[in-house]
Image: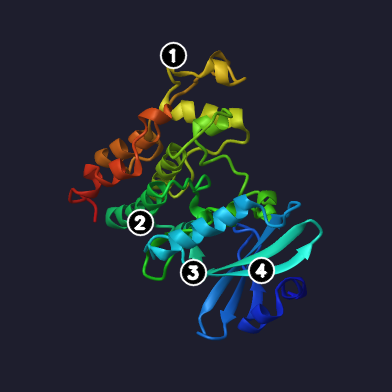
Amino acid sequence: MAYLENSMSADKQKAYEGLNKIGRGAYGTVYKAKDKQTGNDVALKKVCVPLDEDGIPMSTLREIALLRQLNSHDHPNIVKLLDICHGQQVGQDLVMFLVFEHIEQDLATYIEKNPKGFSTLQIRQLSRDILNGVDFLHSNRVIHRDLKPQNLLVTYDGHVKLADFGLAKTYDFDMKLTSVVVTLWYRAPEVLLGLSYATPVDIWSIGCIIVELYSLKPIFCGSSEGDQLSKIFRLLGKPAKHEWPEENTSIKWNSFDVINQITLGQFCPYICETAQDLIMGMLTFDPNKRMTALDALNHKYFKEEPINT
């Protein structure tokens, strides 16, 4: 832990103690520490910010301001940012530490700990928490861009909090090197095709995650962009030719042949009809036709009495 301590300013070293690296690489470089003033455990996320000739880039300052603004709302489904510590300059980078509330497990671990699965009520609560957090981000014009079970934290009482958005993801170079970060499994088709994207990319990811809560395994496990698209089309069907953005991508519509197509119900027989309807509204190829987070929260899936409680 010497490198971490040497990277922090002296006053912040006095504020936090007991530094230990935590996680399995899913969060990049994150350390568990104790806030000496409150006695609470915290998570310190190391962020490397590339400096320009004027010092800290204006884009970074805007990201920090945005994180502070979002944090001021104290949203129950967003991990709390407690402090931002300026560290030492290393080469052309400034090392900073974002101090978050510490939550013991992510959704991937939570799923692993429940091999018998979840009740409909549990899945509905977890899904609602995720959507509430994403709706809050989208209403503040923030796209998460990397929603997956490893970036969703689960509290001791079973509620979800979104993590790793904004500065924590954009400027953390260590995270980009981990295999978990570069996974394609939760990426929307427009991202796989190299197109411009907006808030609908998060909705696609949530659709994949809800299926995983039912099936206890990822729905699309591709090994490359093309393979990921092939797996998506095998389950959801190949989009019509007029929906394909031929002019904006080098990947051609006729390069995909769907063989042995299956349905969502075949992939996961335990998903009820209303859940399937919700998920298919999220896993829509055309992002302009994909439902919004608010649409999803108002879906009948969250309002009906579940058959399997």
Q: Secondary structure at mark 3?
A: loop
Disc with the residue nearer the chain's start (2 vs 3): 3
- Note whether 299 is above or below 111 in the view shown: above
Q: CA distance from mark 4 to mark 3?
A: 23 Å
Q: Are marks 4 and 1 in contact (CB under 8 Å)?
A: no
Residue extending furthest toward the front: 54
Q: CA distance from mark 3 to mark 1?
A: 46 Å
Instruction: Look at the numbered disc 2 and give the secondary structure of its residue.
Output: helix
Q: Considering only order in the chain, which callout, 2 or 1, is on the residue closer to the N terminus?
A: 2
Q: Disc number at residue 103?
A: 3
Q: Quadrant of the C terminus?
A: bottom left
Specify whether 250 is left or right of 71.
right
The residue identified by callout 1 is 242
Alpha carbon separation for disc pair 2 and 3: 15 Å
| The N terminus sits in image quarter | bottom right
19 and 144: which is toward the camera: 144
Q: CA distance from mark 4 to mark 1?
A: 51 Å
Amino acid residing under circle 4: His
Q: Which mark is residue 129?
A: 2
Residue at the disc numbered 4: 86
Residue type at the position of mark 3 = Ile
Q: Position of residue 231 (x, y in %)?
A: 52, 30
Going from N to C along the chain, the mark reached first, 4 or 2, is 4
The residue tagged with tag 4: helix, strand or loop?
A: strand
Res 278 → quadrant = top left
Badges 3 and 1: C-beta atoms under 8 Å apart? no
Dot 3 or dot 1: first in sequence order is 3
Task: Give amino acid for label 2.
Answer: Asp
